[in-house]
Image: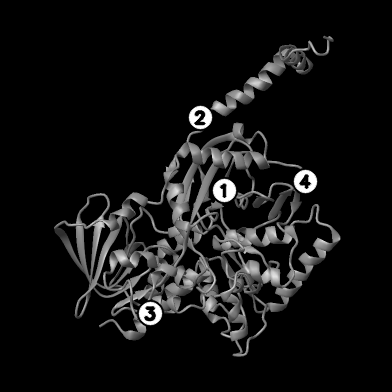
Amino acid sequence: MSERKKFSRKKFLKWGLAGLGVVGGLTFFSGIFADRKRIIPGEIMGGNAEIGHLLREAIRADVVEELEYDIVVVGGGVAGLSAAWELKRRGVRNLILLDLDDKVGGNAVSGESNGSRYPWGAHYLPLPNLDNRDLLNLLEEFGCLTGYQNGLPEYEELYLCHAPQERLLIHGLWQEGLVPKVGAGEVEQAEIARFFDFVQGLKGRLGSDGKPLFTIPLDGSSSDARWRLLDQMTFSDWLSKEGYASRYLLWYLNYCCRDDYGGTLETTSAWAGLHYFASRNGLAANAAPNSVLTWPEGNGWLVNRFYMALKDFIRTRSLVFSISEQSDQVLVRTLDTQTKEVAEIKAKKVIFAGPQFLRKYLMAKSGRKNGLDLSCFSYVPWVVANVHLSKRPAGIGRPLSWDNVAYGSDSLGYIVADHQLLGQRSETVITWYKALTEGKPADERKAAQSRTYSEWQETVVKDLEWMHPGIRSDIKRLDVWIWGHGMIRPEPGFITGEDRRLAAEPVGRVHFAHTDLSGISIFEEAFSQGLRAAREVLEEGIV
């Protein structure tokens, strides 16, 4: 046998380590193995799944508190906050907003630790369309919009996402923007350009009824039958029909569906897919089109402004488990999640600002009304992780950006929570997102909630290591939040369906407000739904 064949694995390691420097080599390998075993502190946070599941039980307890209000708002997400804000603005004072969590916000809630703020869900707001006067007025009241110049809004510079805004890791290189460029040939580039030329041409285009084909709020869009028919087919089928086949384009469009809708090309309606690109026409005097407003705590910044305006009308840790209409009032029963005491509230009107799937647990007579079928409301689970790092991630190519995504990953990448802050520290917090879109939502929800913290931690770290090899050793803490019903999904037929319209109709003295009544879970829709419900109540009168 030759000497080469006698060269054992032991000798190979010996000489290989010598090539690194024996001590340095041993340190190198032992460091990797030790780092794999290092315990990263953290926990699964939020969601209040256990408290929410109390709705499934028959709660029998003596009423220890009786209250009376003109209006009760149930649910402290953006829709509920918007409804209460509008009611207060219109002079209503005998008002209370109930929410089961420790603080309001819904999926726009945020966190803070060691001087760092970060989102646990929604994290930005695109520039509003100029005809969305309600939203522009809100931003002006909150100090985000500072004035107008030549008819265009001027925004506080600190809240406009600064460059570099987005980057994509593709073929080992970070490129600018999220539309794949690296590796795309001329044919694919031409196809990508054809798609964006098409959707650009849809912006501002009117339907046969004189309304924009696509706008925000969604219900302001045209009812032109030719275009509404697109809601009956999947985005995937429409793209195939139109001859779009570029793997890079299809990956990007699928990413967009997962990011905004919690769906895929196969589960998102073609109308909703085009709405994503053609509905926004926001402009500003001091920002480019397509700019976004963001804050370290994401849309938690907006939630905190709502809270400051409404704090005297908010009651948290209040699990509403029954809403029943009487002849001239509505009885709302709520459980204090700390004391387990039950309060009964008599109200002249109620705005239910929770998701529709809760109706069957809270309102025995409203699960089906005029043929309403709530089973068509499909809610996608999400997982969000906030990762505290000892140093900022790097990479070859474009520098660290606000939004950082990897081509081919089944996650949605991460944002840098403190991207907006000047004089940034080397330490940072990144917020990682993943929509669970592979299987049926109920199956994904069950699987997500059955996984341990360690399992979720490893999922997050492995995805981040794909983007940043060795990042594990920089992680100081990693917390996970599971959103079991993270957002409504606009599946084919839902947006133009009769059930969505019927679900928004009042049931006696109970009115409804939530993004699931739009079919798209974005701030603008939640805000619009809240205003609509509040104005319905005021138009009917509080009697």
In terms of image quadrants, where is residue 82? bottom left
**Image height of 411 relative to 228, above or below:** above
Mark 1 and mark 3: Cα distance apart in space? 37 Å
Quadrant showing the C terminus: bottom left
Q: What element carries label 4?
A: loop
Which comes sooner in the sequence, label 2 or label 1? 2
Q: Is residue 233 left or right of residue 367?
A: right
Which comes sooner in the sequence, label 1 or label 3? 1
Disc 1 packing (10 Å; few <14; some 14–19; many ≥20):
many
Circle number at residue 505: 3
**Residue 411 appears in view:** yes
Query: Which residue does the numbered mark 4 point to in the structure image?
Result: 397
| Front of the two marks 1 and 3 | 3
Query: Which residue does the numbered mark 2 point to in the structure image?
Result: 39
Q: In this view, does 85 lie to the left or right of 179?
A: left
Residue 96, position as x, y percentages in the image? 30, 67
Mark 2 and mark 1: Cα distance apart in space? 19 Å
Circles 1 and 4: CB atoms closer than 8 Å: no
